[in-house]
Structures are given as structure tokens and as C-alpha cells.
Amino acid sequence: MIVEGVELRWLDLHLRTPHRTSYGTDTNRPVILARVVCDGAEGWGECAAFAEPTYSEEYAEGAWEVLRRHLVPRLLAAPPPTAPPGGSARDGWLALSGLLRGTLAGVVGHRMAKATLEMAVVDASLRASGTPFAAALGVEVADVDAGAVVGTRDDPGELVDEVEALVAAGYRRVKLKIAPGWDTVPVEAVRDRFPDLGLQVDANGAYRLDAAAGDAASADRLRRLDDAHLLCVEQPLAADDLVGTATLARRLSTPVCLDESVTSLRRLEEALALGACGVVCIKPGRLGGYGEAVAVHDAARAAGVPAWCGGMLETGLARAANATLAGLAGFTLPGDLGGGDRFEEGDPAGALAVTAGRVAVWRQAGMGPAPRPDALRRVTSRTEWLAGS
Ligand code: MG
């Protein structure tokens, strides 16, 4: 597969409802798309990086720069990425993903930017052969459970009303964002109102293990959430505090889930060895691509650790790919795949429809729906075409 060039597009999108977490509020949701043009096919990749470097080090402007200056030039200078002949569709796309990882390995980190190109190249390859991502993954289910996410709010009553609407819409699992000072009271309010709802919380690393942090910010506070019978408490401590997380996990009856901490298969293996990971959230962007996401899924499944597919407020393109990934057998908990059309401007790829708390696996060729040209034009503020030689 000869890569003729890569077009980067910057989409100016805004969230209908600001996304409030322990690290801040996101209103702008710029999305970078990469369109890889090959001989005979083109493919689309979507970058997970947010506007600001608050969820992780990566952010959209930085991803744009590293893509145009460092990653796309490496892709264009490398030998054409071609999977070895004769293998299964699964072998083929995983080999392609591995080749891409090797091509981009000279750049340290920047996993979300790298994942953008991996997705685009794999998408082009799948479209060229008319293969749906589900077939390449070996996913046979038609749809998967989608969970909903509710950010922090000012008032527990407001939160309960929002959860009520989500339950009425068919969601069977709801995730509440928590932060020091917004934890026990709102969680108990929701649990009291919905005793049987699948409920989990996400702290985005906002707590500290040491008591010096003060009661409100101390991880001891999370023990009070054990009575709420949560599916898991996600990323309670800082991403790099695996030893502390293992200590905390021993003190809680609620399983501890890792999100930001797990940036690679190796990091998952370390976390498992330490006893710091009872549940894992798998995000292809955070892991550098779908190939690494499958490796993490396989390792978690082998270890008997439940997994679920995370979300990064994606468009319908990456959401469809994620819903398909979530059809693998190790994804035993509902993923952050709900929410429908979250953008004021409308979703340029078409939002993933949620029906009775389920979303469909993508069954057409490629990773997900290609963005619609007219919708793309309306929200694109910047494009750059980088041609191969
Ligand atoms: Mg999270």
C-alpha cells in the first residue's frame, strides 16, 4: 500500500454540555482528523487529544505539530506499509499496526497523535479490501452495552435528575465524575435513588494517598464509597502512582480501575504485578493505537481482569471503531460509548445511535463512518496536505 499523502484537518467543535471533571471544564472540543490517501484507497484517523493538556500531556495543538513535523514525514519516508500475505484479516491489520508502531517509534510518547495515523492507515487497508473492522477483529456480536458519563455538578439534586433521564433513556450503567468535595454526598444521592443501577466513579487522579492531603482530598475518603456498591473507582490517584494505587486497592472493597496510568501493555503488566489494577479502562488513543489496545485487552483477559472501553468525547468515526473494539470478549463491563450527538455543530461523522443502552458494532468496510464532506467543510478551520515523494 503506497501512501501518496496525508491530509490533516482541524475541526472546531464545541460541546453542547460542558464536560466538567476534577481537572477542569472542557467546552471546546477541537478534533484533528488525518486522511491517508493511498493507491486505491483512503482512510480516516481521529485524534483523541483534548484542547488542553489536562487529561494527559497531549493536547490538540501539540498533536497537530507533532503530526505535521515528525510523524507524517516518518510515515511518508518509510517503505510502504504492507501486511505480509497469507494471514487472516486479524493477522493482517495487527501486522500493519505493528509496522506503523515501528515506523513512528523514533518519536517518544505522543501516543494519541500516533494512534491517529495508525487508525487512518488501518482504515485505508480495510476499505481497500472491503473488510469491516469487526471482521478483522473477529468480533461477532451485533451491538454492545453503552454507558453514560455525567460530569461534576453544583447540586446533587441536579445530578440525580440527570441520571434519572439517562436511566429513562435505557442506560444501565452510569459513570459519575468525582472530585475532592464532590464525592460521598452526590454518589450516595444517586445510589439511594437507583439501588440497582450499574454505577461507577472516575476521579481522574484527584486524590492523594497521604493524610497530609487533608480529609477532603485524602484517598481514605474513598473508603466511604464502598457502601455504594460501585462497579469500580476509576483512577483515584495520580497516573504515575502505581505503588500508592496498590496500597489503596488493598484498603478498598470497591475494585480500583486504571485509566490514565495504563499507557502501554508494559504499564498494565506492571500495574497487575503490583496489585494496582482490578479493572482496566482501554482507550486506543491513550495507548497509541488499536493494536496496542488489543494487546492490553488480551493481557487483561488472560489475567481475569475486567475491561471496558473508554471514551474521549469522540466523533461518530472513532466511536464506531471503539464500539466495535468493545465487542471483544474481554470487554465485560459497559464502555463510555453513549452520549449521542454531543457537538453544537453536529457530529461530522454522524453520532453513534444509542438504542436501549446499546450501540451497534460497525459492519461496513473500514473502522467507522467516513465524515460527510459537507459537514466537514462547515467545521474545518485548517487543513494541511503533506505529500509523499
Ligand atoms: Mg477516566
Image: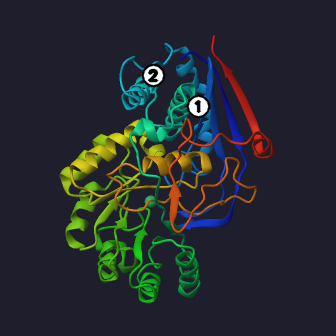
**Front of the two marks 2 and 1:** 2
Residue 279 % position (x, y)? 30, 59
Circle 1 residue: 67
Residue 96 % position (x, y)? 43, 25
Quadrant for ligand 1?
Answer: bottom left
* Whether residue 289 can be seen here: no
Q: In which quadrant of the rendered view does residue 145 lie?
A: bottom left
Q: Residue at x 53, y 46 (%)?
A: 362
Q: Amino acid at mark 1?
A: Leu
Q: Residue at x 41, y 70 (%)?
A: 201
Q: Is residue 125 above or below residue 119?
A: above
Task: Mark 2 and mark 1 in contact? Answer it, CB < 8 Å.
Answer: no
Q: Is residue 351 above or below residue 227?
A: above
115 vs 296, left or right, is right
Circle 2 residue: 103
Indicate if the residue with disc 1 has its beta carbon within 8 Å of ligand 1.
no
Q: Amino acid at mark 2?
A: Thr
Of residue 234 and residue 171, the one placed in the foreground of this image is 171
Q: Is residue 232 above or below residue 45?
A: below
Of residue 296 and residue 372, the one placed in the foreground of this image is 372
Marks 2 and 1 sit apart, C-alpha to C-alpha, by 13 Å
